Amino acid sequence: MINFRIIGRQFSTSISKQNAIKNVTVIGGGLMGSGIAQVAAQAGQSVTLVDVSSDVLAKSQKSIGANLGRVAKKLYKDKPEDGEKFVAEALGRIKTATDPGEASKSADLIVEAIVENMDVKHKLFKQLDSAAPAHTILASNTSSLSINEIGSVVKRKDKFGGLHFFNPVPVMRLLEVVKGAETSEDTYKSMMEWGKAVGKTCITCKDTPGFVVNRLLVPYICEAMRLYERGDASARDIDIAMKLGAGYPMGPLELADYVGLDTNKFILDGWHKKFPDQPLFKPIPLLNKLVAEGKLGVKTGEGIYKYDKK
Ligand SMILES: CCCCCCC[C@H](O)CC(=O)SCCNC(=O)CCNC(=O)[C@H](O)C(C)(C)COP(=O)([O-])OP(=O)([O-])OC[C@H]1O[C@@H](n2cnc3c(N)ncnc32)[C@H](O)[C@@H]1OP(=O)([O-])[O-]
Ligand SMILES: NC(=O)c1ccc[n+]([C@@H]2O[C@H](COP(=O)([O-])OP(=O)(O)OC[C@H]3O[C@@H](n4cnc5c(N)ncnc54)[C@H](O)[C@@H]3O)[C@@H](O)[C@H]2O)c1
């Protein structure tokens, strides 16, 4: 609730500030990329949203339109015509494309939000590095991979960093700005300014596993799964406990289903491989079983809970 008002206020004040980034290319039109494109367009920036799949791009445009409608309802409660204008103008600032190289040519900033796979990200960033103008900042929205490792393939290491958004992007107010070992001070400042311009509260993170939020959130969710797996409490009771006892908007198991159990597993497996002695990152049989059965959470209609298929 407060989110929208705050987003609204920041939106109206921040675009007047001198943010040098005007043209943003977002690569990956899925859940996160469409949200990132939306907040940038809302803030008055020209956005090119890129995906390998035109079907995904069509779906993204539809969901961005619907989510802008939700924002407009809040911002222009008593002036629906202004709300419609806001939605149409923001949508009008978003172009779509399927060729990342071509879409990079006029970008001041490129935010990558493609699949969480190091090899695929490397391939993309090599292409972006050679196609984008010299001044363009390249950033990854990775949840769990190392920014230095992703950026190892680009020449412009001073203009590479992390911009980690949270799901759902239009609602969650935080942006983690990640400084890699070679990220320059100018790049870091530009990323912070841009984050504020798109309505986010920015924090500074080092390139450590999970940055701040996921370093705390992943072990928390995993401990909730282990508690449930041991039979210490029911799933519902664990979620009720954390909502009513700790004030979280969602319980840990609901959140795991919302994020996707495959994503949970992917992060945990990656960290376990890198840090085999860390007990918090040890595999969870229940999680492995659910993922093997294709029960990935809300998106497949079943995870820890069952959901009505839409
Ligand atoms: C092993 C662990 C793995 C971790 C993985 C990490 C992943 C990643 O790296 C980090 C994350 O993102 S971590 C994940 C971090 N994320 C979290 O932790 C999320 C925690 N959950 C929440 O904050 C809330 O449950 C939600 C905001 C999701 C839904 O809120 P609710 O109250 O349950 O339900 P509601 O009433 O429907 O919605 C409320 C308001 O929001 C509005 N709205 C919703 N979606 C919208 C959209 N896409 N656009 C625009 N607006 C949208 C909606 O219109 C409504 O507005 P109103 O004006 O008030 O009527
Ligand atoms: N889902 C979350 O809650 C969340 C939160 C924060 C960060 N992230 C991170 O954001 C990134 C994207 O996650 P998501 O949940 O949006 O994934 P998603 O699967 O919804 O979307 C990824 C999109 O990238 C596209 N794609 C894949 N390879 C591509 C390429 N080479 N060029 C262009 N498009 C390509 C796919 O077609 C897909 O539409 C990941 O790195 C993830 O770790 C996810």
Image (cartoon, grey):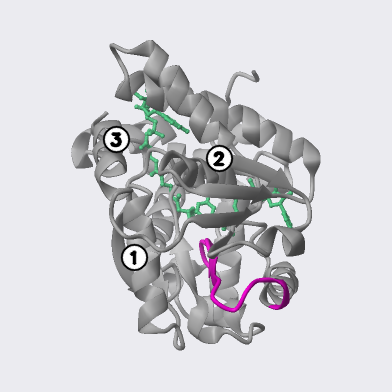
Identity, as a three-letter code, of the amino acid under mark 2: Arg
**Looking at the image, which residue is at 32% across and 19% down?**
76
Please tell me which residue lies in front, 56 or 231. 56
Whether the magenta-drawn stretch holds residue 6 is answered as no
Asked whether the viewer can see residue 285, the reply is no
Helix, strand, or loop for circle 3?
Answer: helix
Residue that carries the numbered disc 1 in the rendered image: 192
Residue 137: say if magenta. Answer: yes
The residue lying at 52 percent from left, 26 percent from top is 88
Question: Label 1 amino acid?
Answer: Met
**Magenta residue span:** 130-144
Distance in Å between CA atoms under marks 1 and 2: 22 Å
The image's mark for residue 8 is 3
| 116 horizontally vs 1: left or right | right
Q: Does label 1 or label 2 sit earlier along the sequence?
A: 2
What is the quadrant of residue 99 in the picture? Answer: bottom right
Residue drawn at (65%, 46%), measured in percent from left and top?
Answer: 29
Residues 297 and 174: in front is 174
Q: Which of disc 1 and disc 3 is earlier in sequence?
A: 3
SS label for mark 1:
helix
Which quadrant, please, contains the N terminus?
top left
Q: Nearer the viewer, mark 3 or mark 2?
A: 2
Residue 242 percent across, percent down from the top left = 28, 40
Q: Earlier in the sequence, mark 3 or mark 2?
A: 3
